[in-house]
Amino acid sequence: MTAGVIIEFGVRCLLVLLFLPFSALDKILNFQGAVGQARRAAPSRLIATGLIFAGLGVEIFMSLGVITGIADRLAALVMAGYCMITALLWKQFWVPGDFWQRSDGLGRGLFWDFMKNFSLAGGFLLLTFGLNQASVSAFLAHPWASSQPYAR
């Protein structure tokens, strides 16, 4: 195993570490609390429950895709979308109205979570599209294909 493969594996693990195991495990162990949080964006308990199950699926299966390299680019694209959607739905730093009034206010804490989500989305988009036109073209031509991250 080369240093490049070890580094690639480590970076991919770091990228998904927030989701698998931590966020997924939190949803499982505190399922009712997660549904309660989802109710802020969902009109009914049934829809909120569905959102939590969908989130669990994304966090587990897409994270595994990123780590294993199985349809990793598509998995990373889904994770990027997930990060952005969850930021917009649950990290609304503008809602509390205390962003400029208190340095320890709820708005400030939500702002950093919002920015964290969008920063993670950037990392996932980099994994999805790469750094050059050839990589973007390869993804668009075969979105289900693996990027073969460990084939060195």
Image (cartoon, rainbow, N blue to C red):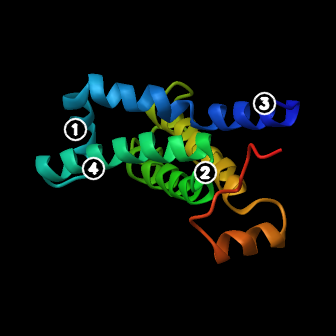
Residue 89 location (% of width, % of height): 38, 51
Tag 1 secondary structure: helix
Estimate the spatial distance between the alpha carbons at disc 2 and disc 1, rounded to whole Å: 24 Å
Left or right position of 44 against 78: left
Of badges 2 and 3, nearer the viewer stands: 3
Estimate the spatial distance between the alpha carbons at disc 4 and disc 2, rounded to whole Å: 19 Å
Mark closer to the chain start, 2 or 1: 1
Q: Is residue 90 in view from this perspective? A: yes
Say which of 80 and 9 sits in front.
9
Mark closer to the chain start, 3 or 1: 3
Estimate the spatial distance between the alpha carbons at disc 2 and disc 3, rounded to whole Å: 23 Å
Which residue is at a point 22% across and 50% down the rendered structure image?
Answer: 50
Q: Name the mark on residue 35.
A: 1
Estimate the spatial distance between the alpha carbons at disc 4 and disc 3, rounded to whole Å: 34 Å
**Circles 1 and 4: CB atoms closer than 8 Å:** no
Tag 2 secondary structure: helix
Residue 19 location (% of width, % of height): 48, 35
Q: Is residue 101 in view from this perspective? A: no
Estimate the spatial distance between the alpha carbons at disc 3 and disc 1, rounded to whole Å: 37 Å
Q: Give the residue pinned by disc 3.
A: 6
Mark closer to the chain start, 2 or 3: 3
Report the amino acid beneath label 1: Val
Quadrant including the C terminus = top right
Q: Give the residue pinned by disc 4.
A: 51
Tag 3 secondary structure: helix
Estimate the spatial distance between the alpha carbons at disc 1 and disc 4, rounded to whole Å: 8 Å
